[in-house]
Amino acid sequence: MQTIRELSKNSEETIIPNGYDANGWSSVLSHELNVLFHALCHVVPKYQSKEEIKQALLEFQGVKHAFAHVDRSRFKSEEAYQGYQKRLERHKRFMQRSGYQYPNSLEEAIELFVKWGLLLDKETYWDVPVTPFPDVLELFNLKDEEKAALAHIKLEALIHPVFSKLVLMLHEKDENTFRYTKNELKEILEINDAMLLEVLVKLTPYLEEPIVNMQAIPDDQEMEFTVVWERIYEDFLGTKDPQSIQ
C-alpha cells in the first residue's frame, strides 16, 4: 500500500489521492467532510502524533467551525444559508441510509474516516492511503441512479488524462486532419481496446464529422478524422484563442 507519508518524504507538495475523486468520495460527502479530508492530506505528513495533527487541523477555518451549529452570519444571504442547510440534510440522509450517523465533532468525523479507510490509524499517528483507495460503491447503500452517476465519474477520471494526452499529441502536429490506425493510437497512448473506444467517443464532439463505424474498423486500418480546434479551445480554455494551450 502506498500512503501520503511515504510519498511525501521527498516532496513539499500536498498529495491528494486520485481515488478520492475517482472513487466517488468528493461527490457523496458534505462540504465540511471534503474540507477535512483535504486538510488531513496537508497536515498528516508534517506531524508525528495524533494530537499534533488535530491541533494543525483546527488552524483551518473550514475545520474549526465544522460539525457544529451553523452560524447564519457566515452566509451572504438567507437563501444561501437555507441552500447550505438543505444540502447538509441531504448528505445526512444519504449516510443514514447506509447505517452511518453524521459526525457532530472533529473526533467523530475522524472515527468515520478510519472506519471507511480514508484514514489509517497507526496507533500514535494517522496516515492517508493513496493506492489502493477505498471505493464508495463498496461502503454505501446506493440507488441505481447513484451507482450510474458514480460509475460515470470513475470512467471520466480514467479517460480524462488519456484524452488530454491525445489532444496534446495531435495539437503538436499543427494540423487539423489526421490518419492513424487503432494499433498506432493504442501504442502511443499505452491503452487497451476498451479505453481507446472511450477516448475516441470523447473526441467525437470535436471532430468535423464522426468516425463512421468506429467499432468495426480493423485495428490495422487507417482512420481519417478532422479536429475542429476551436471547439476544444472553447470547451477547455473558455476561449477560441489557442495561445494558452500547451
Image (spheres, grey):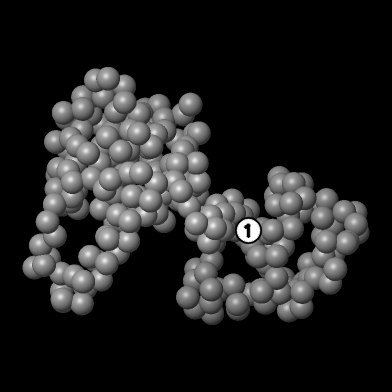
Q: Is residue 131 left or right of residue 10?
A: right
Please report the residue visible at 32 percent of the width from the left and 61 percent of the height from the top.
Answer: 90
Q: Position of residue 100 (x, y in %)?
A: 33, 44
Please report the residue visible at 88 percent of the width from the left and 61 percent of the height from the top.
Answer: 217
Q: Is residue 93 left or right of residue 1?
A: left
> Would you place residue 117 above or below residue 101 in this image?
above
SS type, badge 1: helix
Please report the residue visible at 49 percent of the width from the left and 78 percent of the height from the top.
Answer: 239
Front residue of 79/188: it is: 79
Q: Position of residue 111 (x, y in %)?
A: 27, 35
Check disc 1 and give the amino acid type: Phe
Q: Position of residue 146 (x, y in %)?
A: 50, 58
> Would you place residue 58 above or below residue 78 in this image?
above
Q: Quadrant of residue 5?
A: top left
Please report the residue visible at 38 percent of the width from the left and 51 percent of the height from the top.
Answer: 97
Q: Is residue 222 visible?
A: no
> Would you place residue 226 above or below residue 67 in this image?
below
How many C-alpha atoms fall within 10 Å of the one at disc 1: few (<14), some, or many (≥20)?
A: many
Q: Quadrant of residue 15?
A: top left
Q: How many marks?
A: 1
Front residue of 128/188: it is: 128
Q: Position of residue 63 (x, y in %)?
A: 19, 48
| Screen quadrant of the C terminus | bottom right
Residue pointed to by mark 1: 163
Q: Is residue 207 left or right of residue 121?
A: right
> Would you place residue 149 above or below residue 174 in this image?
above
Q: Is residue 215 left or right of residue 82?
A: right
Front residue of 127/71: it is: 71
